[in-house]
């Protein structure tokens, strides 16, 4: 099918929910995708931070193929060697205090379950999240999202959600009380324009949570699995070594196969009993094969170190470039802040066959490339941004 036929069918048969780029991606490899018309694009958006190992990484493809030939799926009512190995591997790369995994299907489901676990562990209902944060589109997650108009879209909202100002501990103290079950945050707010907080803020949140018996949740749906230059933002230097009680994960976790997870520490896990949580497809064998292979590929190809190299290369190369005000973020979750709205830059890059992303901050262009992207490929972006 040619592009016009594909576009017509999608527009005819699907609800209109996204403003799409006028390309149809048919295949990909590494940091590159090819369209139905045979054009080749450099993908610095990674399917919205999903394609961590690059498109169709051979190790991930092989693992999925081999598992598909054995069994595609069986539910959590049976044990599974693949699920066991994947849980062990994921816990092994997590911060040391996070010892238990719960597998689900997506980021919003991971966040729903993280909040549910916190309420079960504390016997309280209130959840504090932050202006600029995005946590998903299902009922509890969208009610916890104080970015833009998402809460309006999600009405009627789940009760018990309040917001504080990201990076401002005084604003947290102003809304916290004895009914607070959890504080949940994206440690880097991607959709808000790659907004960061000081390491001290995370230390203050940890202390406040400990003092009041509150569960601290890091939504690492975008920041996790190597994207910010370490396996997790939690426990890193950027977090001042702080480890939360729960980490929620998705996106990069399965290299494109839908999968989510919560990592939980022992103190919180001891409150969860049989039948408190459940999911039909979570922990399915095909998804687990993708997760295990993803973690193995990131390790084998030294992709976390590469993410740090990419960040430094971009910072060095764009220093002093006309119109570039700042570089935000860590690793391969980066925002280029311009003096003016970046819409024309985004359009120009797409015209040069380079895919990037925008954000709710009109001046910030987002980069969420595969962790395997090379400095030579990043130079293609730099050349366009440096030209008149």
Image: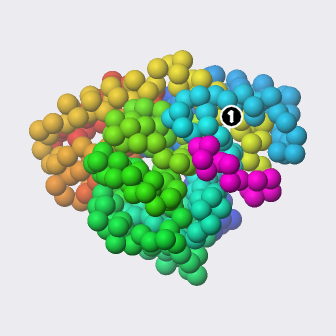
- What residue sits 60% from the left and 47% below the top? 267
Q: Nearer the viewer, residue 280 or 176?
A: 176
Residue 92: percent from left, percent from top: 59, 28
Q: Nearer the viewer, residue 80 or 177?
A: 177
Q: Secondary structure at mark 1?
A: helix
Q: Is residue 334 left or right of residue 382?
A: right
Q: Is the residue marked by circle 1 packed among few (<14), some (14-19), or many (20+) residues within 10 Å?
A: many
Q: Is residue 14 left or right of residue 246?
A: right
Q: Is residue 323 magenta?
A: no
Identify the residue under disc 1: 87
Vertical arrangement, residue 154 with respect to residue 207, above or below: below
Q: Residue furthest top?
A: 300
- What residue sits 65% from the left and 62% below the top? 120
Which portion, as a residue range, is magenta? 259-277
Residue 154: percent from left, percent from top: 55, 75
Q: Residue furthest bottom?
A: 156
Q: Nearer the viewer, residue 279 or 41?
A: 279
Q: Is residue 28 visible?
A: no
- Which quarter of the rendered picture does the C terminus lie within? top left
Q: Is residue 120 visible?
A: yes
- What residue sits 61% from the left and 33% below the top? 91
- What residue sits 36% from the left and 42% below the top? 239
Vertical arrangement, residue 28 with respect to residue 62, above or below: below
Vertical arrangement, residue 13 with respect to residue 97, above or below: below
Residue 358: percent from left, percent from top: 36, 54
Q: Is residue 11 left or right of residue 359?
A: right
């Amino acid at each position: 099918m040619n592009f016009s036929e594909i576009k017509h069918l999608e527009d005819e048969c699907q609800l209109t929910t996204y403003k799409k780029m006028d390309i149809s991606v048919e295949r990909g490899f590494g940091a590159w995708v090819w369209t139905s018309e045979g054009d080749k694009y450099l993908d610095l958006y990674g399917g919205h931070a999903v394609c961590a190992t690059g498109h169709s990484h051979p190790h991930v493809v092989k693992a999925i193929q081999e598992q598909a030939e054995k069994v595609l799926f069986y539910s959590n009512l049976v044990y599974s060697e693949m699920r066991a190995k994947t849980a062990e591997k994921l816990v092994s790369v997590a911060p040391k205090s996070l010892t238990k995994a719960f597998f689900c299907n997506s980021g919003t489901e991971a966040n729903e379950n993280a909040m549910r676990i916190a309420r079960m562990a504390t016997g309280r209902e209130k959840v504090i999240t932050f202006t600029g944060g995005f946590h998903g589109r299902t009922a509890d997650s969208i009610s916890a999202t104080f970015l833009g108009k998402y809460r309006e879209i999600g009405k009627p909202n789940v009760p018990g959600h309040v917001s504080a100002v990201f990076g401002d501990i005084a604003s947290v103290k102003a809304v916290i009380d004895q009914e607070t079950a959890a504080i949940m945050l994206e440690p880097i707010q991607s959709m808000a324009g790659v907004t960061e907080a000081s390491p001290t803020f995370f230390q203050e949140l940890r202390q406040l949570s400990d003092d009041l018996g509150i569960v601290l949740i890091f939504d690492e749906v975008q920041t996790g699995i190597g994207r910010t230059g370490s396996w997790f933002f939690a426990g890193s230097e950027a977090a001042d070594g702080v480890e939360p009680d729960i980490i929620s994960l998705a996106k990069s976790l399965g290299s494109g196969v839908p999968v989510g997870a919560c990592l939980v520490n022992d103190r919180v896990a001891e409150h969860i009993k049989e039948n408190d949580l459940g999911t039909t497809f979570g922990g399915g064998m095909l998804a687990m094969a993708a997760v295990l292979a993803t973690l193995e590929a990131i390790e084998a190809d030294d992709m976390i170190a590469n993410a740090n190299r990419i960040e430094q290369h971009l910072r060095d190369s764009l220093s002093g470039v006309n119109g570039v005000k700042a570089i935000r973020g860590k690793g391969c979750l980066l925002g280029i802040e311009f003096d003016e709205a970046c819409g024309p830059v985004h359009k120009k890059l797409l015209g040069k066959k380079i895919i990037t992303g925008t954000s709710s901050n009109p001046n910030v262009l987002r980069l969420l490339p595969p962790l395997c992207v090379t400095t030579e490929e990043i130079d293609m972006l730099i050349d366009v941004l440096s030209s008149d």
